[in-house]
Image: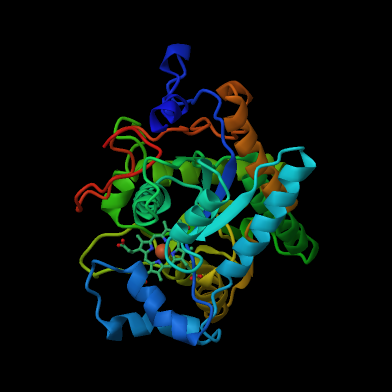
Amino acid sequence: MSSQLVPHATPAASTGLPHVLVPGRYDAVLLAGFGGPEGQDDVLPFLRRVTRGRNIPDERLEEVAQHYRRFDGVSPINAQNRALRAALQDELHSRGLSLPVYWGNRNWKPFLTDALTQAADDGHTNLLAFATSAYSSYSGCRQYREDLAEALEQADLAGRVQVDKIRQFFDLPGFVTTFAEGLRETLQELRTSGVPASAVRVLFSTHSIPLQHAENSGPPDAGSGPGGAYVAQHRAVAARIMDDLGELTQPVTWELVYQSRSGPPPQPWLEPDICDRIAELPGEGAEALVIVPLGFVSDHMEVLWDLDNEALAAAGAAGLRAVRVPTPGTHPAFVAGIADLIEERLHGEDPGRRGSLTPLGPWYDVCRPGCCLKASAPVRPAVAGLAP
Ligand SMILES: CC1=C(CCC(=O)O)c2cc3nc(cc4[nH]c(cc5[nH]c(cc1n2)c(C)c5CCC(=O)O)c(CCC(=O)O)c4C)C(CCC(=O)O)=C3C
Ligand SMILES: [Fe+2]
């Protein structure tokens, strides 16, 4: 049974397109999310789960917990993913595709194991997973693959259910467009209200990650330069957005900044921090800034707290006018883009015909050996990639 499933998980090297699969015979889609708490009682158990294996004391977790507590212990992320699941299901139906869409999370209910069990009970054995994470890094790519492998074991479905994963989608038109749209509207508003373009700064913000994770992001031979594929992908997308907005962005300047750093202080993470940069901007002639949450697929705590609270407060303290543009969420263009990603896998679409707006893409269907390793940890089993 499982040997029958092997062929479609093998890259079609014979086609000369080593990063592309042959068409897949999928019978269901799995929306794989991060997960978040849905009440005060969930907060600490959720944080313990996210940080498992790292021995972080509850007192330290309680600091992060405070962010959630101010929102009654509820992260918006689950509501976002429920809505995304429903919208994607509708989109697939409207395209005449009968694949059901299941939803499970790495870190909170419904867990990946719950979703896999449900899918298997419903008779599905060939799943195509869409992880709500656009860029290459341990947290955004390999960790989903590892947690999917672990969930298959826990649900006692290893060898019976096959899970492949959709490529990283940082330069997918339906993803990029949503940010470009928000940025365009904001720049137009600023222009209308008389702020000179030379006094506007665009900060593309993404999750900081340990430098080690960044260096190891993407396949080892990708040659993406310092910061690895993670930084290169963000830069390429930001540059493309600014380019496409044409004269509206002349002479607006942009840069990539990082947020939500955690971990022990001596460990180097990607910099500069968004709030540190905001404090410096008035000295550089800025009067207004636009924050584009380029690293985030939907609203969750990093967006509501670290951007809408901390970064906007930093802007206020610096005397800057500031706007945060929306995340993709359930924007129809994004939902359609995800459906396109599913269709390209069903049809084994040629890379030349796949949605990709930067020279870095379209990214690999099957992760290369050594893709997005964490460096400091033993390698865990993972689905949807070439070993290890
Ligand atoms: C790249 C990246 C994404 C984007 C890709 C993706 O979406 O997957 C992301 C998303 C998210 N991260 C989230 C939450 C957390 N991330 C943490 C910790 C960490 N994230 C990291 C990276 C990322 N994280 C890293 C390198 C760590 C340090 C741990 C380590 O060194 O391995 C911690 C632990 C506490 C702390 O350390 O502060 C929490 C609670 C939530 C849910 C928010 C909500 O509930 O609304 C979401 C969507
Ligand atoms: Fe995180």
- Residue 313 appears at what percent x and percent y? 54, 79
- Residue 376 appears at what percent x and percent y? 19, 53
Residue 72's place in the image compared with 349, above or below, is: below
- Could you say which is closer to the camera, residue 331 or residue 294? 331
The quarter of the picture where residue 290 lies is bottom right
Residue 125's place in the image compared with 254, above or below, is: above
User: Is residue 296 shown to the viewer in this render?
Assistant: no
The reply, left or right, for residue 246 in relation to residue 308 is right
The residue shown at (56%, 30%) is 25
- Could you say which is closer to the camera, residue 241 or residue 344? 344
The reply, left or right, for residue 198 in relation to residue 218 is right
- Could you say which is closer to the camera, residue 207 or residue 368? 368
Residue 200's place in the image compared with 366, above or below, is: below
The residue shown at (56%, 24%) is 351
Which quadrant: the C terminus?
A: top left
Which quadrant: the N terminus?
A: top left
Q: How many marks?
A: 0
The residue shown at (47%, 42%) is 233
The quarter of the picture where residue 381 lies is top left
- Residue 378 appears at what percent x and percent y? 19, 50
Colour mode of the rendering = rainbow
The quarter of the picture where residue 171 lies is top right
User: Is residue 292 shown to the viewer in this render?
Assistant: yes
**Ligand 2 found in image quarter:** bottom left
The reply, left or right, for residue 357 in relation to residue 186 is left
The reply, left or right, for residue 145 in relation to residue 199 is left
- Residue 354 appears at what percent x and percent y? 61, 29
